[in-house]
Image (cartoon, rainbow, N blue to C red):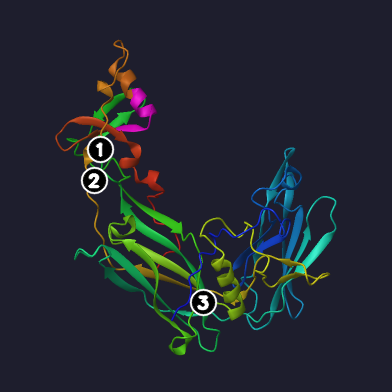
């Protein structure tokens, strides 16, 4: 039985604003992922309702030096902190450490030297030495159509994940990126607005420029909004098999054109890390982030070198990630959209009686509308987002790195 899913990047933790016991405690995020560029951040916990003296100290630290080192003495470092640009003080919260050439056959740990404020001394935090967890094998994607409404019609798609790794903890952690091809709400327009003349050009009979509007179909790439974990110790071989990790409506934008890809990034993690993340999840309402306060009993593996009772919030693991691009073979269906809901006729709106057609056109265009001829051959205007797929976070060109 799979025990848990953890929305790691979206957590709101229980916190007692009266005691403020974790105020100022460091929050350190990131993982040692060998073979990749790793990103680490550090900040301070702020209570929900602090008094002004505490609030003005802020969440940012003054300076931090992150160092990943191996047991043979090799190290990889990056800094983060406040910087001055043109007289303005800005904060760079993320440190990037390139571990693309780091060997996998040795132990690693993270060291973080932190200067909390301008006047504070530098404190050092460390993880224990860790043997990198091996990359799991990502199996094929399982697809199941579901009748969620109970009306005899398949209306949802369930996607199942399979992960396996011999001689490991049986605990897994993953997130994913999505890429899909989609169509704007309405078909390509036959009318074009010329901004110079404020006139509308009709291309419906223009055999040379039938494809003048290239923004009906786009690609969209997006990252999963949460990182999930699961434990498979109760399953055969301690492997995940057809583990549901996503469900979506069959009318989802991602499924409509039959070009939907998922790039899965998975890792095995030690059971201690799983239990830490599960403990975080038990106190979560699935909103916020790890930068929000957490209960004091949720202790990770990052401690102050000079004071072992002083811990930072967070758990840093060491692993080798597995990546695989999976194609979703199920094609969904488009929801019916009544085109008339988008139509707008600026010529019928109350304007100054002296306004010219050009002035009315400019006003409609300035408010984000484009000319559009409906199925009854009537000229209207519609919001640009209805016919321009770029307005829905799309790009005309397929992003690089998605070769199967």
Q: Which residues are magenta?
A: 362-370
Whether residue 306 sits left or right of residue 157 in the image: it is right
* Residue 148: percent from left, percent from top: 28, 64
Residue under label 3, please give it.
172
Q: Kindly identify the residue that appears in the image at 27 percent across and 68 percent down.
A: 146
Q: Are marks 3 and 2 in contact (CB under 8 Å)?
A: no
* Residue 111: mark in rendering: none
What residue does disc 2 label?
337
Circles 1 and 2: CB atoms closer than 8 Å = yes
Q: Is residue 8 above or below residue 72?
A: above
**SS class of the residue under badge 3?**
strand
Residue where numbered disc 1 is placed: 341
- Cα distance between the residues tagged 1 and 2: 8 Å
As measured in the structure, the alpha-carbon distance from the residue carrying label 3 to the one carrying label 2 is 41 Å
- Helix, strand or loop under label 1: helix
Is residue 142 within the magenta segment? no
**Disc nearer the start of the sequence (1/3):** 3
177 is higher (above) or lower (below) than 58: below
Name the quarter where the C terminus is drawn: bottom left
Toward the top, the furthest residue is 354
For this rendering, which residue is in front, 318 or 170? Answer: 170
**Residue in the image at 34% along x and 37% along y:** 384
SS for dot 2: loop
């Amino acid at each position: 039985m799979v025990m848990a899913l953890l929305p790691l990047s979206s957590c709101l933790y229980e916190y007692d604003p009266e005691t403020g016991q974790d105020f100022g405690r460091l929050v350190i995020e990131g993982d040692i992922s060998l073979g990749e560029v790793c990103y680490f951040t550090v900040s301070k916990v702020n209570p929900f309702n602090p008094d002004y003296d505490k609030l003005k100290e802020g969440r940012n630290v003054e300076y931090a030096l992150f160092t990943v080192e191996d047991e043979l003495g090799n190290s990889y470092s990056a800094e983060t902190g406040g910087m001055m640009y043109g007289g303005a003080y800005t904060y760079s919260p993320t440190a990037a450490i390139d571990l693309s050439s780091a060997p996998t056959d040795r132990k690693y740990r993270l060291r973080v030297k932190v200067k909390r404020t301008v006047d504070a001394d530098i404190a050092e935090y460390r993880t224990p030495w860790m043997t990198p967890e091996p990359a799991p094998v990502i199996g094929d994607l399982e697809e199941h159509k579901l009748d969620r409404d109970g009306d005899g019609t398949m209306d949802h798609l369930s996607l199942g994940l399979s992960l396996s790794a011999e001689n490991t903890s049986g605990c897994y952690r993953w997130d994913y990126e999505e890429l899909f091809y989609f169509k704007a709400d309405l078909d390509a327009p036959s009318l074009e607005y010329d901004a110079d003349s404020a006139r509308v050009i009709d291309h419906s009979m223009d055999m040379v420029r039938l494809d003048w509007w290239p923004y009906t179909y786009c690609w969209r790439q997006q990252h999963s909004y949460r990182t999930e974990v699961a434990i498979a110790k109760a399953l055969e071989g301690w492997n995940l098999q057809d583990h549901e990790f996503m469900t979506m409506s069959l009318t989802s934008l991602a499924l409509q054109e039959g070009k939907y890809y998922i790039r899965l990034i998975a890792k095995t993690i030690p059971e201690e890390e799983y239990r830490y993340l599960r403990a975080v999840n038990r106190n979560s309402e699935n909103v916020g982030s790890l930068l929000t306060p957490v209960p004091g009993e949720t202790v990770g593996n990052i401690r102050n070198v000079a004071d072992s009772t002083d811990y930072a919030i967070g758990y840093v693991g060491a692993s080798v990630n597995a990546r695989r691009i999976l194609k979703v073979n199920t094609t969904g269906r488009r929801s019916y959209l009544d085109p008339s809901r988008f139509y707008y006729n600026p010529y019928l709106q109350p304007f100054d009686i002296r306004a010219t057609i050009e002035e009315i056109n400019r006003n409609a265009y300035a408010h984000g509308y484009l000319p559009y001829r409906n199925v009854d051959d009537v000229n209207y205007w519609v919001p640009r987002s209805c016919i321009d797929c770029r307005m829905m976070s799309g790009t005309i060109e397929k992003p690089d790195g998605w070769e199967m």
